[in-house]
Amino acid sequence: MSRHAINLGTAWEPPTAEAMRWLRCFGRPTGIEPGDRVVLVCQGAAMPAAWQAATLNDGPLGWHAAADGVLECDVTDLLAERNLLVVPVSDPKDVVADLGRGARAMLPAAWGRLSMVVVSD
């Protein structure tokens, strides 16, 4: 079984007072074969429950604990050519100062390290 990980920790649109959510756009990974699975993996999140409200292309994510400090969610059936991952925030301290239109930021360390993993048998 081979695994190819794609880091999703960068290029997020940060939450603002008007839009209390992290947004991450990305394309469908290339080279996916029939039978391959695509899994979101979050490692080391200080607040793993915050990921439970996340959506991909308006569909809810079914996270489960895969190991100590690791969350996984199979998103194979939710993927499109262009994808939008939305992670709502409820704490005003998560709001980022206005960085300007189109600004991108790294996901804060407290949210963990997020990657998309293509799993081939």
Image (cartoon, rainbow, N blue to C red):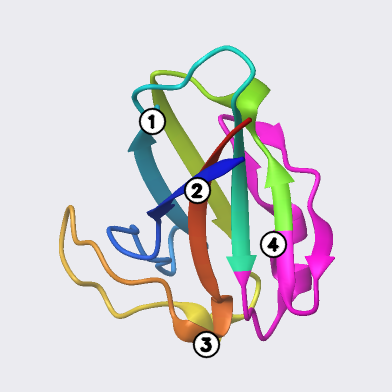
Cα separation, mark 1 vs mark 4, equals: 22 Å
User: What separation in Å lies between label 4 and label 3 (alpha carbons)?
Assistant: 17 Å
Residue depicted at 44% across the width and 77% down the height: 95
**In percent of the image, x 61 and y 57: which residue is there?**
41
Q: Residues within 10 Å of mark 2 (few under 14, many from 20)?
A: many
Say which of marks 1 and 3 sits in front: 1
The residue that disc 4 covers is 51
User: Which tag, 4 or 3, sits closer to the chain's start?
Assistant: 4
Inter-mark Cα distance, 1 to 3:
33 Å
Q: Which tag, 1 or 3, sits closer to the chain's start?
A: 1
Cβ–Cβ under 8 Å for marks 1 and 3 = no
The answer to whether residue 73 is magenta is no
Q: Is residue 47 part of the magenta span, yes or no?
A: yes
63 sits left or right of 100 in the view: right
Q: Amino acid at mark 1?
A: Pro
In three-dimensional space, the C-alpha distance between marks 2 and 4, rounded to whole angstroms, equals 14 Å
Sequence-first tag of 2 and 4: 4
Give the amino acid at mark 4.
Trp
Pointers 3 and 2 in contact (CB under 8 A)? no
User: CA–CA distance between discs 1 and 2?
Assistant: 9 Å
| Numbered tag placed on residue 116 in the rendering | 2
Q: Position of residue 115 (x, y in %)?
A: 48, 57
The residue pinned by badge 3 equals 93
Please tell me in which quadrant of the rendered image residue 9 appears: bottom left
Q: Earlier in the sequence, mark 1 or mark 2?
A: 1
Question: What secondary structure is marked by label 2?
Answer: strand
Where residue 10 appears, x then y in whole percent?
A: 31, 63
Q: Which residues are magenta?
A: 43-71
Q: Which residue is mark 1?
A: 29
Task: Mark 1 and mark 2 in contact? Answer it, CB < 8 Å.
Answer: yes
Few, some or many residues within 10 Å of mark 3 (<14, 14–19, 20+): few
